[in-house]
Image (spheres, coloured by chain):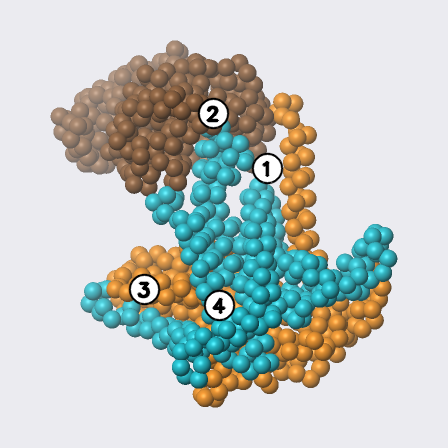
Chain colours: A brown, B cyan, C orange
């Protein structure tokens, strides 16, 4: 077990800055996701931590010890790759045993460790088979078992579920959480799938264009995004951003008067989660023109506009709203995020 | 569509099958018949004449020795080239192109290239003279210096034939996803272990076909030898050529041809057995 | 990071790597340079002692003189002719087979592949020996067509396997889309598949050319007066002066090197396919 300190890491590819001074601390035993769209630098950061790539500048400390310049094998970590990288020319048993063999662990202990890891991931029946006979999900389990068998201080996972089909992904996600909770290993998990990150992580670091835009618990990041990017990236539908006029330090939403954190501004961006609204009568509620109403079974999804800006909101399935209706919405004060129109950054949650 | 006109694929392969039957299978059978017959009756006379010829023993020995030296060295150099080029980013294309140039050079031309270096007034002697290692021109390619001649031929063959092995090996290496090596690295394997335990097993098919191709070609060695040593260094195909063209004895030439074929087939079978390629154990 | 990194160690390994690479490049290139010197140095060049290895006293004249030697241009064009026939036949016969292997499942497919792979286990040039007799009977002996035919035996299996890989590389969906939009199978092939496969097929053709251009044994056995360049050089080798031999070597090398340069981008893809 160990904590990880990422200290002002930069990475340039030629003139392109893939990582722009990233600092992040991951506590002992914590599960942190690096979440972001492709090309945001999350995989590069993971590979720098692993030692597969070198940083242009900055430091990485694992368990208070700088690992820069150390080869991967001396960093005390294990990794699960996106394409599993389960060796096709070795049996499942030999795959899971690989790391232990490299550490010259004696056979009896190898057997014990492999059986333990195989048990956790339910792959005992396949130990004698070659990976090509296995399904994607089974190979994924082998890859995880191989990583856990060495009892690493740190576990790195690079989009481990992205090659599985939707149903299997959900199943593996739940199982990963169970397994990792019991192992208690410090884990860094790279993904572009926000539901994976939300479901698995203790904390999420949202990355964009080589910087960490926000670090926080899933609930925090969801409800109080630090930037417009985070709000737009996380949640389905994404957070709505409505530019509204400020009068006397307040914004009027129907009869609701909402106090804004920066009274001096003439305009502010109202960040609104689609489900943080209730249906209201028109003069009292904020006016929304509904362009399309889609009953989804579990809820009702409305696409339309407020103040001539596109929005999507979610209402209970029991409400009846039809395409073309004009409706009123009552906003949940506690779930509003205010953002600066200029910088795209949000005002601290406490001030809202 | 495929079902409605089942004859289409046969129509497509028919011309090539007919061609190969006419110019591969028929001559193959003819060669074998020529070798094991005499005046239209089965006989081992040709084989006997071949075996009793004074050059037979030497040509067998020379061909085998040459193959045994050349093929492993070529494989080693090709693997080194493949490993090196995998480590660099810039200039990769150019370097690979330079290394593949000998692929397009015939064995005759290769022999002539090395003749220009190793002949009496050539660059090799000039270099040794310049370094003060020899005092006068030394002959390396005469029948009095069989070891030097052997080394010269081996060098020319290695120079020319490594490119094909390298191309097959690099193509094989390209098909190994880099994650395998990275995973091995993460789990503690050093460069040497990665090479032996991950890379080599994963390029088995490439190794197998490179070895088969190169070995069959090595038993066919002829023009390099002829250009460098004339008839001072008998090899199997050279003997076949002499019996056919100089002695006009097609029977003995065919006996040599069959012998070379048997050796090539045997080598192929040995490789197929020794380097098992199990599709189940490939990426 | 440079402080924590054993920088000296890393750079010395890089240095080692690059010196290895450069040494291997020199190993390939220097001999070609030297034979070119020999070809352009003429008679004096050959007997100069000791040699410096520098391009001194060279001119194109000795090489041009060699080209004007009786039989050289003739054999050069014979080689071109034989290689042209090889290219045409191996693509015309090999590409349809490659297409059939790539797109159809049919009984006997595996046997056909076996036949093609079997040719690789035989020293094919040797098969020229019994052909002498049949060729004489058919009037093909000592003709360029005859040489082209035997060289096609060498190039055809290669062409079939490589074109199979090339056609597999053209997504089936594209062809199916063409059918859906009204093409017949033949139209779809020429409008959609052929243009996409063309660069690969051209590369295959270049290889067929090189195979024929470089072949010595069969060409020497099957010709007497209509020699290809390799066959010509082999027969006059023992009685030619050294600088003629070097000029011959250079003449053999030049076209092949140019061709390899032309297809360098396909080399590895092609051999990746053909070594399966």
Contact check, label 3 and label 1, Cβ < 8 Å: no
Q: If the image is split into quadrants, where does the N terminus of chain C sit?
A: top right
A282 left or right, relative to C127: left
The residue where tag 1 is placed is: A15
Q: Nearer the viewer, mark 1 or mark 4?
A: 4
Can residue A116 be seen in this snapshot? yes
Asked if marks 2 and 4 fall on the same chain, the answer is no
Number of labels in the image equals 4
Which of the image's four quarters has the C terminus of chain C?
Answer: bottom left
- Chain letter of disc 1 in the image: A
CB-based contact (under 8 Å), mark 1 and mark 2: no
Say which residue label 3 marks.
Answer: C111
Q: Nearer the viewer, mark 4 or mark 3?
A: 4
Is residue A94 left or right of B250 when viewed as pictured? Answer: left
In three-dimensional space, the C-alpha distance between marks 2 and 4, rounded to whole angstroms, equals: 50 Å
Query: Quick one: label 1 or label 2, which is nearer the N terminus?
Result: 1
Give me the chain letter of mark 2: A
Q: Residues within 10 Å of mark 1 (few under 14, many from 20)?
A: few
- Chain ID of residue with mark 4: B
Q: Is residue A51 left or right of residue A236?
A: right
Residue A227's place in the image compared with B39, above or below, is above
- Secondary structure type for disc 3: helix
Return the x and y of residue A177 as percentages of the image width and height.
31, 21
Name which residue lies at 55% across and 27% down: A71
């Amino acid at each position: 077990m160990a904590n990880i300190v990422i200290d002002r890491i930069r990475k340039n590819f030629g003139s392109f800055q893939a990582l722009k001074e990233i600092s992040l601390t991951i506590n002992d035993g914590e599960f942190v996701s690096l979440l972001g769209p492709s090309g945001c630098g999350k995989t590069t950061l993971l590979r720098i931590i692993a030692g597969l790539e070198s940083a242009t500048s900055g430091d990485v400390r694992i368990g208070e010890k700088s690992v820069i310049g150390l080869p991967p094998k001396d960093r005390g970590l294990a990794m699960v790759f996106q394409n599993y990288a389960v060796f096709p020319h070795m049996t499942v048993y030999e795959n899971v045993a690989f790391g232990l063999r490299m550490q010259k662990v004696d056979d009896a202990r190898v057997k014990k460790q492999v059986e333990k890891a195989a048990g956790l991931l339910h792959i005992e029946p396949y130990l004698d088979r070659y990976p090509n006979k296995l399904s994607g999900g089974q190979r994924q389990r082998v890859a995880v078992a191989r990583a856990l068998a060495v009892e690493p201080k740190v576990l790195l996972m690079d989009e481990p579920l992205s090659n599985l089909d939707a149903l299997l992904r959900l199943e593996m996600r739940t199982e990963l959480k169970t397994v990792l909770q019991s192992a208690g290993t410090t884990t860094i998990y790279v993904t572009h799938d926000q539901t994976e990150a939300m479901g698995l992580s203790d904390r999420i670091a949202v990355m964009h264009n080589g910087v960490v835009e926000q670090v926080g618990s899933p609930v925090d990041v969801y409800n109080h995004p630090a930037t417009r990017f985070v709000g737009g990236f996380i949640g389905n539908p994404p957070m709505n951003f409505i530019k509204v006029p400020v009068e006397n330090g307040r914004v009027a939403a129907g009869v609701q008067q909402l106090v804004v954190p920066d009274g001096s501004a003439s305009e502010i961006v109202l960040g609104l989660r689609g489900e943080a609204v209730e249906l209201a009568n028109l003069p009292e509620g904020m006016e929304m023109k509904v362009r399309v109403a889609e009953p989804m079974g579990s809820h009702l999804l409305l696409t339309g506009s407020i103040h001539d800006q596109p929005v999507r909101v979610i209402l209970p399935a029991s409400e009846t709203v039809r395409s073309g209706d004009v409706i009123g919405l009552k906003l949940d004060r506690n779930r509003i995020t205010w953002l600066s129109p200029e910088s795209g950054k949000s005002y601290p949650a406490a001030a809202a | 569509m495929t079902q409605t006109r089942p004859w289409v694929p046969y129509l497509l392969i028919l011309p090539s099958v007919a061609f190969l039957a006419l110019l591969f299978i028929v001559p193959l059978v003819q060669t074998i018949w020529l070798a094991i017959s005499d005046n239209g009756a089965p006989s081992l006379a040709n084989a006997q004449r071949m075996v009793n010829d004074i050059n037979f023993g030497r040509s067998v020995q020379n061909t085998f020795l040459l193959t045994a030296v050349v093929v492993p060295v070529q494989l080693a150099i090709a693997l080194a080239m493949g490993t090196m080029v995998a480590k660099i980013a810039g200039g990769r294309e150019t370097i690979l192109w330079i290394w593949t140039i000998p692929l397009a050079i015939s064995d005759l031309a290769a022999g002539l290239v090395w003749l220009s270096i190793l002949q009496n007034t050539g660059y090799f002697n000039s270099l040794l003279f310049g370094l003060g290692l020899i005092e006068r021109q030394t002959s390396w390619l005469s029948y009095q210096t069989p070891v030097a001649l052997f080394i010269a031929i081996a060098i020319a063959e290695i120079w020319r034939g490594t490119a094909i092995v390298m191309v097959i090996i690099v193509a094989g290496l390209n098909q190994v996803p880099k994650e395998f090596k990275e995973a091995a690295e993460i789990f503690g394997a050093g460069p040497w272990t990665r090479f032996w335990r991950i890379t080599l097993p994963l390029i088995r098919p490439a190794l197998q076909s490179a070895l088969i191709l190169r070995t069959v070609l090595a038993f066919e060695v002829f023009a390099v030898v002829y250009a460098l040593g004339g008839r001072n260094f008998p090899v199997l195909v050279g003997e076949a050529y002499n019996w056919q063209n100089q002695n006009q004895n097609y029977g003995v030439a065919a006996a040599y041809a069959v012998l070379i074929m048997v050796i090539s087939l045997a080598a192929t079978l040995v490789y197929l057995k020794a380097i098992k390629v199990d599709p189940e154990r490939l990426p | 990071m440079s402080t924590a990194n054993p920088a000296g160690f890393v750079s010395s390994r890089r240095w080692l790597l690059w010196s290895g690479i450069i040494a291997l490049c020199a190993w390939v290139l220097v001999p070609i340079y030297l034979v070119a010197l020999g070809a352009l140095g003429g008679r004096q060049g050959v007997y100069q002692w000791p040699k410096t290895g520098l391009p001194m006293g060279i001119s194109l004249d000795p090489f041009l003189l060699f080209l004007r030697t009786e039989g050289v241009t003739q054999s050069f064009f014979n080689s071109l002719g034989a290689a042209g026939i090889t290219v045409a036949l191996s693509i015309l016969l090999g590409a349809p087979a490659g297409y059939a292997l790539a797109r159809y499942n049919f009984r006997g497919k595996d046997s056909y592949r076996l036949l093609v792979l079997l040719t690789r286990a035989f020293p094919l040039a040797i098969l020229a020996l019994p052909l002498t007799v049949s060729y004489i009977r058919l009037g093909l002996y000592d003709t360029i067509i005859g040489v082209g035919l035997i060289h096609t035996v060498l190039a055809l299996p290669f062409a079939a396997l490589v074109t199979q890989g090339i056609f597999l590389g053209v997504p089936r969906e594209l062809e199916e889309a063409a059918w859906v939009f009204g093409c017949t199978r033949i139209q779809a092939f020429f409008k959609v598949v052929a243009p996409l496969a063309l660069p690969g097929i051209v590369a295959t053709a270049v290889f067929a050319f090189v195979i024929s251009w470089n072949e010595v044994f069969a060409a020497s056995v099957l010709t007497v007066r209509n020699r290809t360049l390799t066959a010509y050089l082999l027969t006059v080798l023992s009685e030619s002066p050294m600088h003629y031999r070097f000029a011959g070597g250079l003449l053999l090398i030049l076209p092949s090197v140019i061709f390899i340069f032309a297809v360098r981008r396909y080399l590895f893809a092609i051999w990746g396919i053909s070594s399966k």
